[in-house]
Image (tube, rainbow, N blue to C red):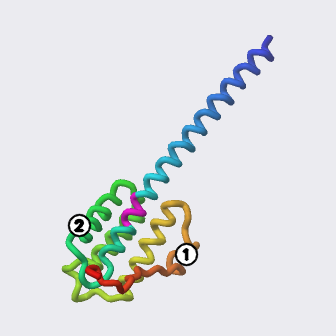
Amino acid sequence: MWTTLISAFAAIIASAGAIYLTKYKEREAIWRSKKLSYYEEFFAAGSGIVGDASPPEAKIRFATAVNNLHLIGSASVINALHQYTDEIAVSNSAEATRERHDQLWSRLVWEIRNDLNDPPSKNPSEFSARLWASGVGRNS
């Protein structure tokens, strides 16, 4: 009789544990998907402001995407984001350099990938990323 009760109790515990783990993994997958969609929008919006003459709509889209990252980004992503946006701010244009821009962009991309559990390298300083402009005019 005791073995039957113990077996039944163990089956209940195992079943509850499996349900908990399944729900945990489902929530984790939903959160990761949500993060990915915010990050994809950020990169798409960033592509819209590459080059010399960004339309106001592109700047607004980028600002919205940057602000939205505060909803889902890890502390390290937010820190890298702030460093990057400080560098590209209009108020910093006199001191901005392409080298510093690319360093900060690389760090931000690395942190985003790391936040998605897919770092492109073990060490952020070993990774390099750059924004690319197509060279096609916006009014072409």
**Residue at image coords 49%, 47%:** 30
- Residue at mark 1: 123
Along the line of sight, the residue nearer the viewer: 133 or 106: 133
Type of secondary structure dominating the magenta stretch: helix
Q: Position of residue 92 (x, y in %)?
A: 23, 82
What are the residue bounds of the magenta stretch?
Answer: 38-42
Q: Residue at (47%, 79%) from the top-left corner?
A: 129
Image quadrant assignment for residue 109: bottom left
Q: Is residue 127 above or below residue 32?
A: below
Count of residue discs: 2
Q: Position of residue 88 (x, y in %)?
A: 28, 79
Query: Where does label 2 land, which residue?
Result: 60
At x 22%, y 75%, the residue is 55
Q: What x and y, as percent, mark residue 29? A: 53, 48
Q: Residues within 10 Å of mark 2 (few under 14, many from 20)?
A: few
Image quadrant in which the C terminus is located: bottom left
Is 16 a magenta residue?
Answer: no
Q: Gap between marks 2 and 1, in whole Å?
A: 33 Å
Q: Nearer the viewer, mark 2 or mark 1?
A: 2
Three-letter code for the amino acid on which mark 1 is drawn: Asn
Identify the image quadrant of the N terminus. Answer: top right
Is 125 on the left-hand or right-hand side of 38? right
Q: Secondary structure at mark 1?
A: loop
